[in-house]
Image (cartoon, rainbow, N blue to C red):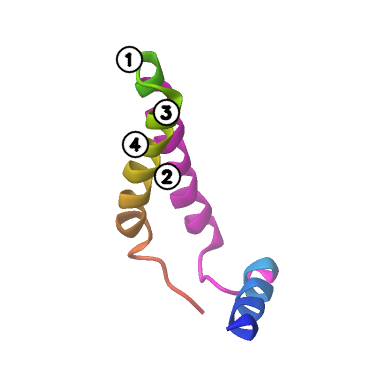
Amino acid sequence: MWDMFSNTLKLFLRGKLFREPGAVFRQWLIGFCVAVTSVVLLAKLGAALGLAVLAAALISGGLQPLLFKNLKYN
């Protein structure tokens, strides 16, 4: 398990894990922006910070499969 993780991490850091590293970053940035926006909006609507973070994590976590479904690996 550790070998698989370390090999994947090495490939990722060298930029050789994905065919289009820019697409990976763009999709990650979309998910990050959705999470931050969700936290801010829910906090502004009066939700407790812990609940806002939990809801934003569920929203952005549910969005990840949709964002990363078309990424190609090397």
Dot placed on the residue nearer the N-terminal end, 1 or 3: 3
Q: Residue at x 35, y 20 (%)?
A: 47
**What span is colored magenta in the figure?**
14-41
Residue 55 drawn above or below residue 4: above
Q: Amino acid at mark 1?
A: Leu
In the rendered image, residue 37, in percent from the top left (x then y), is placed at: 41, 28
The residue wearing badge 1 is 45
Marker disc for residue 55: 4
Neighbour tally class for label 4: few under 14, some 14-19, many 20 plus, Cα within 10 Å: some
Q: What's the distance in space between the residues labelled 3 and 4, CA to CA? A: 8 Å
Q: Name the main secondary structure of what is drawn in magenta.
A: helix
The residue wearing badge 2 is 31
Q: What's the distance in space between the residues labelled 1 and 4, CA to CA? A: 13 Å
In the rendered image, residue 66, in percent from the top left (x then y), is placed at: 30, 56
Q: Mark 3 and 4 residues: CB-CB less than 8 Å, in contact?
A: no
Left or right: where does residue 2 sit relative to residue 43? right
Q: What's the distance in space between the residues labelled 2 and 1, CA to CA? A: 21 Å
